[in-house]
Amino acid sequence: MPRIKTKRTKTAPDGFEKIKPTLVDFELRLKEVQDDRASKIGAKSQQGSWDVFQISHERSRYVYDLFYKRKAISKELYDWLLREKYADKMLIAKWKKRGYEKLCCLKCIQSNESTAQGNTCICRVPRSTLEKNSKDGVVTFTRCVHCGCSGCASSD
Amino acid sequence: MARIWREYKAPDGSKYYYNVKSQQSTREKPADFEDHATGARKSRKTEPQAIYHVTLANNWSMVVCENGSRFFDCKGTLGPQQELDDDESAEILSQIGKEKLALLAETAQNGGGKDSEIYKEILKAVDRINAQSTAKEIDVAAENENEETDAEESGSDSDVSKVSGEESGSDSEVSRVSEEDNLVSGYASSEDEESEEHEPDVILAPPDEANSQNQQAFISLFEQYSLDPYSTWNMQSKKIQDDALFYKISSDATRQGLFDKWCTQQFHDNNDIEKDLNESDVESVETESEQGSDDLEPTKYHYLSHIVSKANILPTTLAKDVRVEQKALFRQFKIKDTLDKKTQEEFISKLLFYYKKLTPEERSNVFDKLLNSKLKVIKNGLRNTGKLKELASQPDLPKESYAIESQLLELEDCMDFHGSNKFLQEDIQYYVLGIKPKTIALKQFLHRNLA
């Protein structure tokens, strides 16, 4: 979530106006998702957060693309966006690393997480490996429990 | 037998041939290909009677025969053609739709007359399409591809129909025709419709030309709908997904890639324009300042000599004293930036000698003597004689001190003080006068020698 704007917040550098409509749209989508009630079924209780993860991932990717791929915004504005938490700085830092280009969320690469039995999340495993390891070539995995990612290996 | 060799055009316009069965491709015309072509021509002689005749664009027309087969005819060329070789006509056909064409073929087979409804409907549709001047650009290459596949498949179909015809013996005419004419026929029968689901297998490797055309058409959408290059593909795609061209590119990943590429290009273009603007701004400023008198470069010790001439000089005055006395002026003219302390002191001491020992008249004589002695060299170095004459002929000095100074600088500039007459800059005797007397003396000197 972006920081709340106060009097002390620095004014946005030039070029913010151009990307503002898109950021507002992201915010609206996040708000919509917030209103969804969580499921009462235990296994599905986390699923409400998946959408939040997905949208914030998308927004981070948007900011990342604007600066690194499209080169549409200045360094100043990019730094400001990171400081105001429009994008996840830590996640973007991972994207710059080889093998992590498509990483869905940071939770999925924490190896000490209890849910993944000390391993990284299944969504990090390439689809081809999943197929090879399965008995009959049918992959049962659809979405990971952490963020609802359906596979974010760089080779996919 | 179906046609094995097909003719394609490579992106550079040259023809090549592709074998459907062995998946070979070659630039030379294969011998097999020729056989099929002549076979097709032979079969044309025993042509079934044409029933329907639909005029398309650019002199092309489509003819549907009584056996339901279809071929194209271009006025002014050799004869009936298997493939439609005209973009506009292909577009018209694609707009009419396959179902209707198939229906027409079926009606022809069943012996429908000229006044059948489907025929009238198609004629009307063609008229309407022709009337539309701003028809959407539709990829012709892909369309041609479809027709070819259909032609091939209908060929194999007619084999089947031949067998069935022999078995039943009811429709012997049709079967005989299809035996000879297995290459003719487009969307020949309703069986084609069933076989169409196999199409994608054949189209799997579309020519690159068509691909790039698709992409171009797709990218043109972005500008047509004035998409925001600062936004995400998710949002912007909603704006254009209702357009037919949107589906020219089948995978969304490719679409997104194209969009990203387009965005990057947009910014690059913008940056270039901005850069150009900035550069031109700088240039214009520079040219302006060259014209303005403000940019005339003063001689090396110009300001220092000016300061000395302003200073109150006693027989005991030293260079140090001048500096202390005229601190403000030193700062104002930024002497420090152009001359180091040692040169300053050296120059001031030398100049003080003239100021201490000589009266203003004597100093002006020294100045004149210097110029006279170097007269020849100076004259050779003059570069703007016309302006110099004009300036020298004005006897009066401007009233403001600033104007006097700029006139002096102009004179010096015309005498090429920074070029061939540079030695004068270094000469101490050139600085023995203050700005005002120097201007007067210089003018007199020039007036005398130029007139």
Image (cartoon, coloured by chain):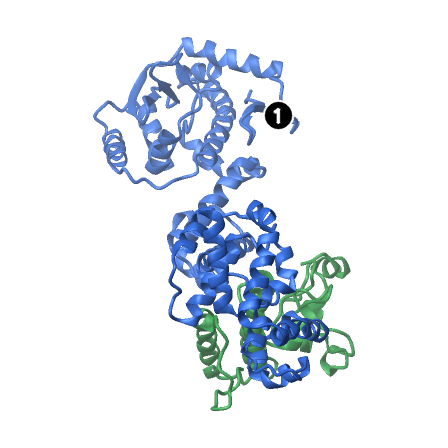
Chain colours: A green, B blue
Disc 1 designates what residue? Answer: B19
Residue type for callout 1: Asn
Placement of B443 over or under A103, stated as above or below: above
Q: Kindly identify which chain the residue marked by label 1 belongs to.
A: B
- The local secondary structure at tag 1 comes to strand
Q: Nearer the viewer, residue B415 or B185?
A: B415
* Residue B114 drawn at (x, y percent): 23, 23
Placement of the N terminus of chain B among the 4 image quadrants: top right
Q: Residue drawn at (60%, 15%), measured in percent from left and top?
A: B32
Q: Does residue B158 appear to the left or right of B322 in the view shown?
A: left
* Residue A150 drawn at (x, y percent): 62, 66
* Residue B299 drawn at (x, y percent): 58, 63
Residue closest to the far left: B115
Tell me the quarter of the picture where residue A144 sits.
Answer: bottom right
Tell me the quarter of the picture where residue B16 sits.
Answer: top right
* Residue B429 drawn at (x, y percent): 62, 64
Q: Nearer the viewer, residue B102 or B256?
A: B256
Placement of A119 over or under B397, stated as above or below: below
